[in-house]
Amino acid sequence: MDFTDAITENTLRAIRFDCPQYIPVVFWINPACWHHYPTDALQELVSEHRLLFPGPQPPPAFAPWERGGKPYVDSWGCTWETTDDGITGSVTNHPLADWEALEGFTPPDPDQANGMAPIDWRQIEEKISSIRKAGEYPVGSLEHGHAFLRLSYLRGYEQLLYDMADGDLRLGRLIEMVETFSLGIVQRYVDLGIVMMRYPEDLGMQRGPLFSPGHFRRYIKPVYERLMTPAHEAGCLVHMHSDGDIRDLVDDLAVSGVDALNLQDLVNGIDWIAARLKGRVCIDLDIDRQAVTRFGGPAQIDDLIREEVEKLGSPEGGLMMIYGLYPGVPLENVNALMDALERYATFYS
């Protein structure tokens, strides 16, 4: 399994502030939606919104760690469990919860795994070739949760925070092990000629980051910078993703050389994002899934998307938008959101 995907020339222009034809918009439907909503109703919405869905949607495919009631052990030996097909669960067994297990612990081989599952680099090379032939641009990605979260999967979240607070020397060994693995993945993608590398993980809670900014600067930021170096040296764009409130970390992320930053809108604040990031990096805006789109109405949804486009966009570019649909959002709101994204994508055209 791999995380390779593609972007268009228009998206490249948006990231580079090179006057895209329209704001790149992505509407991602979580696989669980197909058994929580009437399939015909979802298919009808998809067919009515051709800017968002140029072609038919493939049938839902569940990753091994998205299968309800079926524990899955990833390439690092972490056990994942979920209760609903399509929804990524949580790690219920941390292989390095006891530091004694570090002795003799063998990390996965980047030639054979991507962190979550086996990987076939020959197949990825063929996929990248087909992306180029289709007139698009290949993009590589690390696993979601490649640094801080991977450490928490291995040690356990609370224990990892204690490790950081204590300055445990064994944590340095583990960080080096995780970084070396991820660096192998990055270098392989760069060698295959990608145009952009994604570095996704979650660093924020509902309020504030998952750990202190000081510990981020000491333990994680240097890892990010070293992992991004091969991409920068090859002239690749760098895309960073984090859910949650990351306002205390944004300056450090921007200094690390991020070209596009995917962050959530309302938890960080639209005005705050505009003041701190507009024109500085390309804002890949993750649209609210907690308040307006879930509990508001169509008019409020339209107002939200328009406000975000007006405050964060420009004719030069620097704005992309993505919405992830999960079960529970009223279908009326789903339709309103699709309409608004298509309507305001051409706001500066």
Image (spheres, grey):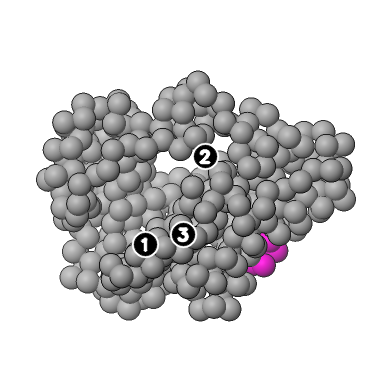
Residue 289 point in image, percent of width and height = 36, 39
Most foreground residue, 300 or 133 = 133
Q: Is residue 222 magenta?
A: yes
Compute the Cα span from label 3 to label 1.
12 Å
- N-term-proximal mark, 2 vs 1: 1
Most foreground residue, 116 or 292 = 116
Please provide the residue range marked out in magenta. 221-226
Most foreground residue, 123 or 107 = 123
Q: Is residue 294 above or below residue 263?
A: above
Apparent side of residue 213 relative to residue 237 in the rendered image (left or right): right
User: Is residue 245 shown to the viewer in this render?
Assistant: no
Mark 2 touches mark 1? (CB < 8 Å): no
Circle number at residue 206: 2
The picture quadrant where one finds residue 6 is bottom left
User: Is residue 28 shown to the viewer in this render?
Assistant: yes
Q: Residue placed at 51% from the left, 78% from the top?
A: 235
